[in-house]
């Protein structure tokens, strides 16, 4: 343990001669810090695009980059050769979420820090990044949704001023905006309505749909939340 502490304290430089214990410490530390980053991603992820392989890739990327940095340390020739070898690789998976790209960059930087034997910076940087991500997740920073749902339904006639549907929407929505009210193209009396709605409590969506379903003449009732639209 004392030897490991001495390595951590004395490892503020790069390009040191190969040392088995130092290299092993770099890879193990990259694995542990990559795990921490992956767990934070797992707990703070939201949406429908979750991928187990992406979470595992965060850990693998951290360790691989650490090994790459240890390989090229102090050797310009090896660095150029490795760049040429890596340029052959083609990544064809499209990453939809910019947040996922940010996590990949975090894994790269952590791996670079551990591979270059800057262990103190790697540990501190991982801690600060994880705390920052958790803060953004808990505070829901940047959230701005004037409307968070899209409601569609059909009626056998146009709604009058005393129609029960607006009363139901007022109970479950902070606000709602009529987008369109279109007569059927087939010459019938069916009217298609589309609303943007701001739901008060998403847990009561089924109750709202149940109340709307009881209205006489309503058909083809659908509610699509904004999170689902963004994932398409």
Image (cartoon, rainbow, N blue to C red):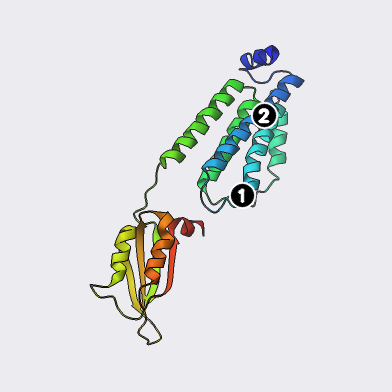
Q: Vertical placement of 91 versus 77: above or below?
A: below
| Secondary structure beneath label 1 | loop
Query: Which of 55/76 is in front?
Result: 55
What mark, if any, has residue 69 been given in the picture?
2
| Secondary structure beneath label 2 | helix
In the visual, does 215 lie left or right of 224?
A: left
Quarter occupied by residue 165: bottom left
In the rendered image, the residue lying farthest to the right is 20
* Residue 19 visible in this rendered orientation of the protein: no
Kindly identify the residue that appears in the image at 37 percent across and 87 percent down.
187
In the visual, does 232 lie left or right of 142?
A: right
Instruction: Give the distance between the C-alpha atoms of the residues marked 1 and 2, in whole angstroms.
Output: 27 Å
Query: Which of 8/48 is in front?
Result: 48
Kindly identify the residue that appears in the image at 43 percent across and 57 percent down.
226
Q: Position of residue 97 (x, y in %)?
A: 52, 49
The answer to whether the residues at label 1 and label 2 have Cβ atoms under 8 Å apart is: no
Mark 2 or mark 1, which is nearer the start of the sequence?
1
Quarter occupied by residue 60: top right
Quarter occupied by residue 75: top right
In the rendered image, the residue lying farthest to the left is 161
What mark, if any, has residue 99 been given in the picture?
none
Kindly identify the residue that appears in the image at 32 percent across and 65 percent down.
168
Q: Vertical placement of 183 versus 173: above or below?
A: below
Q: Nearer the viewer, mark 1 or mark 2?
A: 1
The local crowd at label 1, few if under 14, some if 14 to 19, many if 20 or more residues have their Cα within 10 Å, is few
Quadrant where the N terminus is found in the figure: top right
Q: Position of residue 8 (x, y in %)?
A: 63, 17
According to the picture, the residue beneath numbered tag 1 turns out to be 51
């Amino acid at each position: 343990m004392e030897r490991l502490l001495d390595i951590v304290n004395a490892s503020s430089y790069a390009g040191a001669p190969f040392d088995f214990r130092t290299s092993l410490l770099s890879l193990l530390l990259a694995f542990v810090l990559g795990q921490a980053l992956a767990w934070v991603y797992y707990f703070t992820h939201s949406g429908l695009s979750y991928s187990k392989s992406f979470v595992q890739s965060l850990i693998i990327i951290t360790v691989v980059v650490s090994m790459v940095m240890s390989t090229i340390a102090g050797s310009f020739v090896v660095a150029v050769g490795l760049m040429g070898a890596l340029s052959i690789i083609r990544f064809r998976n499209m990453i939809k979420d910019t947040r996922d790209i940010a996590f990949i960059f975090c894994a790269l930087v952590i791996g670079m820090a551990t591979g270059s034997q800057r262990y103190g910076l790697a540990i501190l940087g991982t801690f600060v990044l994880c705390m920052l991500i958790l803060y953004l997740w808990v505070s829901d920073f940047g959230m701005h949704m004037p409307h968070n749902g899209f409601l569609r339904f059909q009626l056998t006639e146009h709604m009058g001023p005393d129609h029960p549907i607006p009363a139901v929407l007022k109970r479950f929505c902070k606000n709602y905006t009529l987008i369109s009210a279109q007569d059927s193209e087939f010459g019938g009396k069916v009217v298609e309505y589309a609303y943007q709605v701001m739901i008060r409590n998403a847990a009561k969506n089924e109750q709202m749909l149940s109340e709307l379903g009881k209205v006489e003449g309503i058909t083809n009732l659908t509610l699509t939340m904004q999170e689902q639209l963004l994932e398409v």
